[in-house]
Image: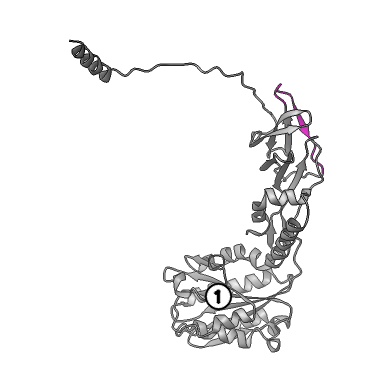
Amino acid sequence: MACWWLVLLLSLLEEVNISFPFNVEVSEYRRFSSEVSSLFGYKVAQFNSTSGQRLLIGDPGSNILCACDVGDRCVNITLPDIDSASHLGLTLEVDPMSNRCLVCGSANPHNCFETQYTNGACYIVDSNLTVSSKSTPGFEDCQNADVDLCFLFDDSHSVGEPEFEIVRMFLLNTIQNLKSSTVHFSVVMFSTFPKTVLNFTDYQLGKAEEKIREMKHIGGFGYLYRALRFTLNEIFTPEAGARQNAKKVLLLLTDGEVNDVNSGATEAADKLKVTRYVIGVGNNFKAEDITELPSNPKEHHTHEIGDFSQLEAIFKEMQTKILAIEACIREYSHMVVLWQNTSMTESEFYFQRNRTVLHLICGV
């Protein structure tokens, strides 16, 4: 009989959804607000100061850093040498071991030869809420490093006359925009056989515009590696005006048609320290067909666009890398040496806690 009632009770429990409510007692919340900017509170970090626990609250919209106690009292921390475009508080990181906080934002961008550089600005706040002077490690001045840049472009039958004219205007505009920089230009067109449009000596003599306006579309087949070796032998040489200490850069423009094989051309380019970028145009371009040609890492030296009309836009993106790579390598090496050979200084703390800020400086 008892078993019968037990079975009935279990059956009823299966049909009924029973819940047992409970309450959790929490302390009263604290509200911190600011009428200065809607970005107040974009970053918040708990911080142990000598006066007790504080909340550090960043406001990138107004460049204000606040220290708030549990009694809702907030004070602004004065950050020296700040400008209106810093957006301080985009990064807010606390090191619990040293009770220091890193506060970063983006400093004012500046232009170098039509290339815009964006750099970070940072401060370190210690446990007394004392602020260090502004730090801008990796700030990129306009570069004086010499660059010899050769445009190697596809002139085979797959490139039509309209596309050829777009390339012509792209070359003219690019050289005009960078004429006050330390970049020297040369141009080689290729199909079945390569042909020099202008070498570095021509550029130095002021003949670039004349030579580019005179070039004519030939057509033929795309013998790319033959053209690469021709460029190494005929363009990147002192006889053609290449400078001894200049950084050598080759920018290849192709729609992807390749009719020859690499027979040591890329190895020769590596030996000459020629950095190679590839711009692939159109649906026929496949990066896997020319994996040997771009410098390493391949994905950073290969760019694809839908058609020739996008040339100027993609080159503007690449321009910073081409002009600034020397400074980035030099600055990054300095950071590594500083980290490995010093004790825990403010500079080391900055780099150790925020190595990703290198992306702001060099895109690495």
At horizontal 78% and vertical 55% (from top left) the residue drawn is 342
Q: Is residue 271 in view?
A: yes
At horizontal 62% and vertical 88% (from top left) the residue drawn is 234
Q: Position of residue 276 (x, y in %)?
A: 59, 74
Q: Which three-letter amino acid code belongs to the residue tagged 1?
A: Leu
At horizontal 57% and vertical 81% (from top left) the residue drawn is 267
Q: Main secondary structure of the magenta part?
A: loop
Nearest the eye: 177 or 87: 87
Q: Which element carries disc 1, helix, strand or loop?
A: strand
Query: What stretch of residues is rendered in magenta?
Result: 69-80
Q: Is residue 347 above or below residue 211?
A: above
Q: Is residue 70 magenta?
A: yes
Q: Is residue 71 above or below residue 94?
A: above
Read off the residue under disc 1.
252
Q: Is residue 58 left or right of residue 250?
A: right
Quadrant of residue 129 in the image?
Answer: top right
